[in-house]
Image: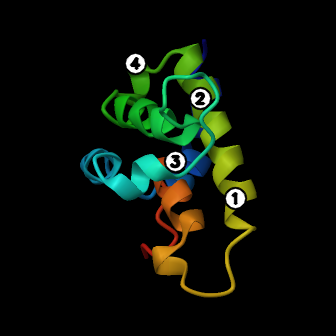
Amino acid sequence: MTNANVDEIWDDWKAAVNMTASEIDEWLDTDESREVGQKDDGSGESVGHKSGRRIVDILNTKKADLNESDVAWMHKVVGYVKRHSAQGPASDVEHSRWRYSLMNWGNDPLKK
């Protein structure tokens, strides 16, 4: 893998993932986090919840140490956040399943 692959996604990743590793970790421990998202492998854990754990791992990795799998996941996260952000609710964003789902993917739409 080249540094160009990481550099290609880096700015979009930093914009999409606006929560810190510790904020995501804390969030993933909440009931709200566990209650949202698709659960499709029988484990009872949603795709987004698993993604949050992977995002924490990537955030705790130095840019120079990221591998191809990490970069591919970064692309997936950026795409998800962009698509999902465009579908926000008309009211009560703060307590919406929409926001909770985005937060599982490392993006708090209320965070400035």
* Residue assigned mark 1: 84
Residue that badge 2 annotates: 73
Q: Residue type at mark 3?
A: Trp
Discs 2/3, front: 3
In terms of secondary structure, where does tag 3 sit? loop
Q: In which quarter of the image is the N terminus?
A: top right
Of mark 1 and mark 4, the one earlier in the sequence is 4
Q: Is mark 2 on a helix, strand or loop?
A: helix
Which mark lies nearer to you, 1 or 4?
1
Asked if labels 3 and 1 touch by Cβ distance under 8 angstroms, the answer is yes
**Can residue 8 be spotted in the picture?**
no
Q: In the picture, which quadrant includes the C terminus?
A: bottom left
Three-letter code for the amino acid on which mark 4 is drawn: Asp
| Tag 4 secondary structure | helix
Amino acid found under the numbered disc labelled 2? Trp
**Image location of residue 7, percent across then percent down:** 59, 35
Work out how far the residue at label 2 is from the one at label 3, CA to CA, in angstroms: 11 Å
**Picture quadrant where residue 52 is located:** top left
Per the model, the C-alpha gap separating discs 4 and 2 is 14 Å
Residue 2: x %, y % from top left: 60, 16
Residue 11: image location, x then y, percent: 57, 49
